[in-house]
Amino acid sequence: MKFGVVVFPGSNCDADAYHVIKNVIEQPVRYVWHQERSLDGLDCVILPGGFSYGDYLRTGAIARFSPVMDAVRDFAERGRLVLGICNGFQVLCEAGLLPGALAQNTGLRFICKFLYVRVEETDTPFTCACKRSQVLHMPIAHHGGRYLADEETMARLSRERRVLVRYCSPAGDVTPQFNPNGSLESIAGICNERRNVFGMMPHPERASESILGSEDGRWIFQSIVRSLMS
Amino acid sequence: MIRVKVLVTLKPTILDAQGQVIQNALAALGYDNLERVRMGKYIDIMLRDDGEGVDQQVREMCERLLANPVMEDFSYEIVEDAK
């Protein structure tokens, strides 16, 4: 299996994601420049964190016009795996590959800290190695991570069990106190209807080695590897 | 030339944290009669009048890019023959 990490102008977690796939998960990986139009030969594409196009207009609003995004859309339609981390999640929402939007944090601050998320569903390629309700220790680093969607979308996400991770206490309790940014229903990550596109605000690639404070991010990447091998 | 002034604001149902902070700051300056402050974006566009559908075009530009319909509303004003 082969991973691709998209590089937009302003991406800044691309090297982290590349490093983890190559050296920690030990899978083949290549960078995909935003001008590229083909993802042939790849099995999973990661849209990394950062500040694509300087967050101009809205986070992720301009990145969706990059040539590579047409390829990402085709890739997703063919059932291949797409993981959007932080800015990548924002881009996926702006591109319409995931519903809803990410607004400024209610506290207006850029929040960069370790916190906890609870795995809500495990029947996806991104969480299949996890246990249901497993708590993962991972950092967030964003200014606009407040997930918003209309009532109909929220009802649908719930009905189709598409909320994959929620912010929680160290023990796994989902309460407003542990919601860092004002996201509706403490949502930290959702997938599409087909379950092959996943966007999340926390950074698993920054939490895949003990020297960085946590190895829990590996659960996400190992899930992907497991699902691609089966 | 036609000038278009586009305003983009968060939907009324969505918490506007910046607006609230501005309101608090204004209150701190002694303005005690503020009912509400909302923060938005202003986009100033000049375009050529090709004779048809400027209104439709502007609406489309707002819907497709300038505003995110999930969380934002937009309004615009078209000023004819701007110099």
Image (cartoon, grey):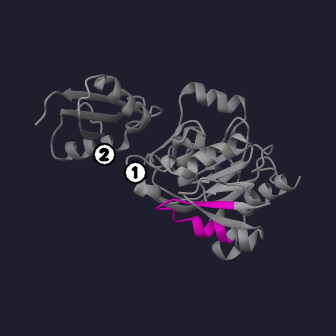
Q: Which percent across, then down, holds residue A71?
A: 62, 48
Q: Amino acid at mark 2?
A: Val
In the orientation shown, which residue stands out farthest toward the left?
A: B83
Q: Is residue A184 above or below residue A16?
A: above
For residue A108, which numbered disc appears in the image? 1
Q: Which percent across, then down, holds residue B70?
A: 48, 33
Q: Nearer the viewer, residue A87 or B30?
A: A87
Per the rendered image, the range of residues in magenta is A4-19
- Residue in the image at 72% along x and 49% along y: A81
- Asked whether the beta carbons under mark 1 and mark 2 sit within 8 Å of each other, the answer is yes
In the orientation shown, which residue stands out farthest toward the right?
A: A230
Chain to which the residue tagged by mark 2 belongs: B
Question: Where, quadrant-wise, is the N terminus of chain B in this rendering?
Answer: top left
- Residue in the image at 41% along x and 46% along y: A58
Asked whether residue A110 is in view, the answer is: yes
Question: Does residue B19 appear left or right of residue A79 in this picture?
Answer: left
The image quadrant of residue A73 is top right
Question: Does residue A37 appear left or right of residue A220 in this picture?
Answer: left
Q: Which residue is mark 2?
A: B21
| Mark 1: secondary structure | loop
Q: Which percent across, then down, holds residue A127?
A: 76, 50
Mark 1, other Cα within 10 Å: few <14 / some 14–19 / many ≥20 = some
* Residue A10 among those drawn in magenta: yes
Labels 1, 2: one chain: no
For residue A38, which numbered disc appears in the image? none
Mark 2, other Cα within 10 Å: few <14 / some 14–19 / many ≥20 = some
- Residue in the image at 67% along x and 77% along y: A211
Q: Nearer the viewer, residue B40 or A79?
A: A79
| Mark 2: secondary structure | helix
Chain to which the residue tagged by mark 1 belongs: A
